[in-house]
């Protein structure tokens, strides 16, 4: 098996002793071990079927062109980026990186202090990273170095990354998740879970026991699922790993679906961990807690975090067990301590079960607000309203029942869309808007004879 590099600059290949590895070919020269890339700002193209590993020692660009890459030994991450570097990973065609369920092998090791930028060259470009052995991360921290992840930026392509026990799909290994920013493309991430050391990790964020770090989503389609082991351990879809807090999540656009593992939040804390800070400025967010976890907020037994919605659509659903209380946004089951902020100043925020358990009374940041249900839309219909000032944000999306949930201060409101005029009076309690059809334009026909 071979890995072939075609460089636009001089390539210095540094052998890393390991007789167990298959050959690696660099510019026509074969080496029966790992290879170090030590040419600053070089561009390396990898093609074909490969086995082995590379150590990246200088800032460079790596192109994956229809690569099928598998691990040949444990404790050797397939792509290891030295701390302090910035590496551009460009995707052409369909590539896979897998560790064959070997233990201690991260797909792409991005340690703290390192930046990885992933983008696509071709429209159909994809990368699948499968690190399903124990003590493995898909993209991020590593058992073989610092568990904390660095900075991972995704600009395009179809990216799927799965971590093993202890490691996030994208993020940390038994440590914090670093900073993950998604600007476009389709990103699917799944954390791992195992009975060993009671481990379960976030889809995007912390490894088992690691906090969520910072996740920024500007666009694209993102699906994140927390890892689960049995009915006991779980990581957040986006946020903290098992028994680790949620970190910071900012959503500016795109479509986000986050599902927590057992006893963990969809977005927020892992099992038995508090939620972090979630701020939504645009886009569409669907967050579902694992059993006993909040949709957005805390894992079982812990408080919810801070929630702000300034203009996106949020559908949040907690998953209580039996007769327990659990927040759609708020605390996990039996975790009502504290009253974190619940601030809504735009968009549509739907509490699927009607629960903001353990949260402060909703405000717009300065005064109380109440839910105003606006019915009559088709499921998932997009719309915008005129006449609500700063509360009338664009790209509102109706839920499956065709309802949009605004949150407004006390007062009487008249607003409209293209076809309807709505009215609602808010007086300290939830209410439902009524609507009437806009009058048809009329005119006078004048005939001349």
Image (cartoon, rainbow, N blue to C red):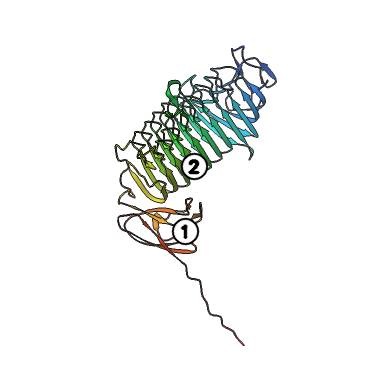
Number of marks in the rendered image: 2
- Please tell me whether mark 2 sits on a helix, a strand or a loop: strand
* Disc 2 crowd, CA 10 A, few/some/many (<14, 14-19, 20+): many
- Please tell me whether mark 1 sits on a helix, a strand or a loop: loop
Mark 2 — residue?
Answer: 256
Q: Is residue 201 above or below residue 431?
A: above
User: Which quadrant holds the N terminus?
Assistant: top right
Instruction: Name the spot of residue 88 as percent of width and height, x first.
Output: 56, 31
Q: Which mark is residue 376?
A: 1
Q: 68 or 119, which is in the foreground?
A: 68
Q: Quadrant of residue 240?
A: top left
Q: Is residue 424 above or below residue 224?
A: below
CA–CA distance in space, label 1 to label 2: 25 Å
Q: What residue sits 58% from the left and 37% below the top? A: 158
Q: Is residue 445 above or below residue 387?
A: below
Q: What residue sits 55% from the left and 17% below the top? A: 74
What residue occupies the far bottom of the structure in this picture?
A: 449
Instruction: Name the spot of residue 288 as percent of width and height, x first.
Output: 45, 40
Instruction: Name the spot of residue 262 as percent of width and height, x first.
Output: 43, 32
**Residue 35, can we see it?**
yes
Task: Answer with left or right where residue 184 lies relative to residue 302.
Answer: right
Q: Which mark is residue 288?
A: none
Instruction: Name the spot of residue 387 as percent of width and height, x first.
Output: 41, 61
Q: 431 or 99, which is in the foreground?
A: 431
**Residue 8, can we see it?**
no
């Amino acid at each position: 098996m071979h890995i072939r590099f075609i460089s636009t600059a001089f390539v210095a290949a540094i052998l890393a002793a390991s007789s167990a590895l298959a050959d690696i070919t660099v510019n026509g020269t074969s080496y029966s071990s790992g290879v170090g890339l030590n040419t600053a700002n070089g561009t390396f193209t990898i093609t074909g079927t490969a086995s082995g590993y590379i150590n990246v020692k200088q800032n460079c660009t790596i192109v994956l062109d229809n690569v099928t890459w598998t691990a040949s030994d444990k404790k050797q991450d397939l792509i290891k980026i030295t701390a302090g570097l910035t590496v551009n990973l460009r995707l052409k065609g369909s590539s896979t990186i897998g560790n064959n369920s070997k233990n201690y092998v991260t797909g792409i090791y991005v340690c703290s202090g390192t930046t990885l930028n992933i983008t696509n060259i071709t429209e159909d470009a994809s990368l699948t990273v499968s690190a399903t052995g124990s003590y493995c991360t898909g993209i991020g921290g590593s058992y073989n170095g610092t568990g904390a992840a660095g900075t991972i930026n995704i600009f395009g392509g179809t990216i799927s990354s799965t971590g093993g026990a202890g490691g996030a799909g994208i993020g940390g290994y038994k440590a914090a998740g670093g900073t993950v920013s998604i600007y476009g493309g389709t990103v699917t991430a799944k954390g791992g879970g195992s009975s060993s050391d009671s481990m379960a990790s976030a889809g995007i964020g912390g490894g088992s026991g690691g906090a969520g770090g910072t996740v920024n989503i500007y666009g694209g389609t993102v699906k994140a699922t927390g890892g689960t082991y049995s009915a006991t351990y779980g990581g957040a879809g986006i946020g903290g790993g098992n028994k680790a807090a949620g970190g910071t999540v900012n959503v500016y656009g795109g479509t986000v679906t986050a599902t927590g593992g057992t006893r963990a939040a969809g977005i927020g804390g892992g099992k038995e961990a508090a939620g972090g800070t979630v701020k939504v400025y645009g886009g569409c967010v669907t967050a579902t807690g694992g059993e006993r976890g909040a949709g957005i907020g805390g894992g079982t037994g812990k408080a919810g975090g801070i929630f702000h919605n300034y203009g996106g659509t949020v559908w949040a659903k907690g998953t209580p067990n039996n007769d327990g209380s659990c927040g759609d946004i708020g605390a996990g089951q039996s975790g009502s301590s504290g009253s974190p902020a619940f601030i809504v100043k735009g968009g549509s925020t739907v509490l699927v079960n009607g629960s903001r358990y353990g949260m402060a009374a909703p405000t717009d940041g300065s005064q109380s607000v109440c839910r105003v249900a606006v019915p009559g839309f088709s499921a998932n219909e997009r719309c915008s309203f005129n006449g609500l000032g700063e509360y009338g944000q664009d790209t509102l999306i109706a839920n499956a029942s065709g309802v949009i949930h605004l949150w407004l201060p006390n007062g009487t409101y008249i607003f409209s869309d293209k076809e309807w005029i709505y009215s609602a009076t808010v007086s300290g309690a939830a209410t439902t808007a009524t609507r009437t059809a806009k009058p048809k334009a009329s005119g006078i026909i004048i005939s001349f004879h």
